[in-house]
DNA sequence: TCTTAAATGTTACTATATAACAACACCATT
DNA sequence: AATGGTGTTGTTATATAGTAACATTTAAGA
């Protein structure tokens, strides 16, 4: 999906959820989209400062939190970063592969595997929340 | 496994790996063991300072990194914390369940599910590294 | 003993994230 | 139009997490 298409889909998704994709949030989303792969909050902050002068961390973190909450971005804990969701619209639980060499990501559906894991967890009395599975490794390009 | 048993097992494992569980590393390991569930580096630092006076962040981070490397602890990225491995000795790839309410963890074997995921990833040209799978949710006690 | 590599100490810093409150914008009701 | 509530953004300050670089000490071999 191209960038404009993604923004349109994001708009739609926010409407459906009854939340507002404000100018600031859209701008932050575009800044994340402008990168390939994982982006860090302080990178977005720097970009934002280039575009609109002054900006402080909470501005960016709030926008990023909102976008994650809205299902438009995913947080990549292992790298303290964020990626654009590649399945906007389809309420999904997926497998996110992150290349530790180049930061590129690949997002797959992994419902079956997650079901298995959920059952395994349930057998221990543990209710796992809805979430993405995050695995690191090397993408084809980086495998030499 | 009780605490003393764990330390003994840790000693053995380090010997087998040809690495040294020094006094400092052992002390840090004991400090982590003293907590139930996830512990944070700066908590360990504070504990260490109580026990031996002055101590600086690198001291703790080095010890924690060593212990993770040696397979005695696991890093919990989602919480910026560390947990004691409950499968010391059996070189494992597991599923780690973390309760977001109380911080307690439950570590399971999940080789079959991981194999599935690894194959799925391989189909995309992606080689996922050896790693634990980390999922958050609620433990039985915290489910009300 | 002498040499060397590993481990630890120390200082200073970078990076990541949030609390708390103020100001503003938007929408609904009077 | 004025009022008041709610959500959003601005602003300042601070909390939390992690590392670089170099000095010093310790342990292991030759
Ligand atoms: Zn997604
Ligand atoms: Zn790559
Ligand atoms: Zn383990
Ligand atoms: Zn719990």
Image (cartoon, coloured by chain):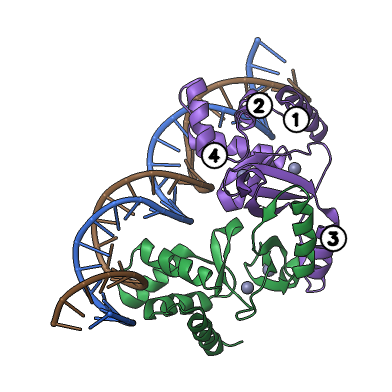
Chain colours: A purple, B green, C brown, D blue
Asked if labels 4 and 2 share a chain, the reply is yes
Mark 2 chain: A
Q: Earlier in the sequence, mark 2 or mark 1?
A: 1
CA distance separating discs 4 and 3: 32 Å
CA distance separating discs 2 and 1: 9 Å
Asked if labels 2 and 3 share a chain, the reply is yes
- Which label lies toward us, 2 or 3? 3
- Which residue is labeled 4 in the image? A41
Percent position of residue A87, x then y: 79, 39
Disc 3 crowd rating (10 Å Cα; few below 14, some 14-19, many 20+) is few
Query: Could you tell whether A128 is left or right of A28 in the image?
Result: right
Name the residue located 84 percent from the left edge and 54 percent from the top edge.
A111
Percent position of residue B82, x then y: 55, 67
Query: Could you tell whether D14 is left or right of B53 in the image?
Result: right
Q: Earlier in the sequence, mark 4 or mark 2?
A: 2
| Helix, strand or loop under label 4 | helix
Question: Which quadrant of the render holds ligand 1?
Answer: top right
- Which residue is labeled 3 in the image? A115
Q: Nearer the viewer, residue D3 or C10?
A: C10
Q: Nearer the viewer, residue B14 or A15?
A: B14
Disc 4 crowd rating (10 Å Cα; few below 14, some 14-19, many 20+) is some
Asked if the residue at tag 3 contacts the one at tag 4, i.e. Cβ–Cβ closer than 8 Å, the answer is no
Mark 1 chain: A
Relative to B142, say whether A11 is above or below.
above
Q: Quadrant of the N terminus of chain B?
A: bottom right
Q: Is residue A71 visible?
A: yes
CA distance separating discs 4 and 2: 15 Å
């Amino acid at each position: 999906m191209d960038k404009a298409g993604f923004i349109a889909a994001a708009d739609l998704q926010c409407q459906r959820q009854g939340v507002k994709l404000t100018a600031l949030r859209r701008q932050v989303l575009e800044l994340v989209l402008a990168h390939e792969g994982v982006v860090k909050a302080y990178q977005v902050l720097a970009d934002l400062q280039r575009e609109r002068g002054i900006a402080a961390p909470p501005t960016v973190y709030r926008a990023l939190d909102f976008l994650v909450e809205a299902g438009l971005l995913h947080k990549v804990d292992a790298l303290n970063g964020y990626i654009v969701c590649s399945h906007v619209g389809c309420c999904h639980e997926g497998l996110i592969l992150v290349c530790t060499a180049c930061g590129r990501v690949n997002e797959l559906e992994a419902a079956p595997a997650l079901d298995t894991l959920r059952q395994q967890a349930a057998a221990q009395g543990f209710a796992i929340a809805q979430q993405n599975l995050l695995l690191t490794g090397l993408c084809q390009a980086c495998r030499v």
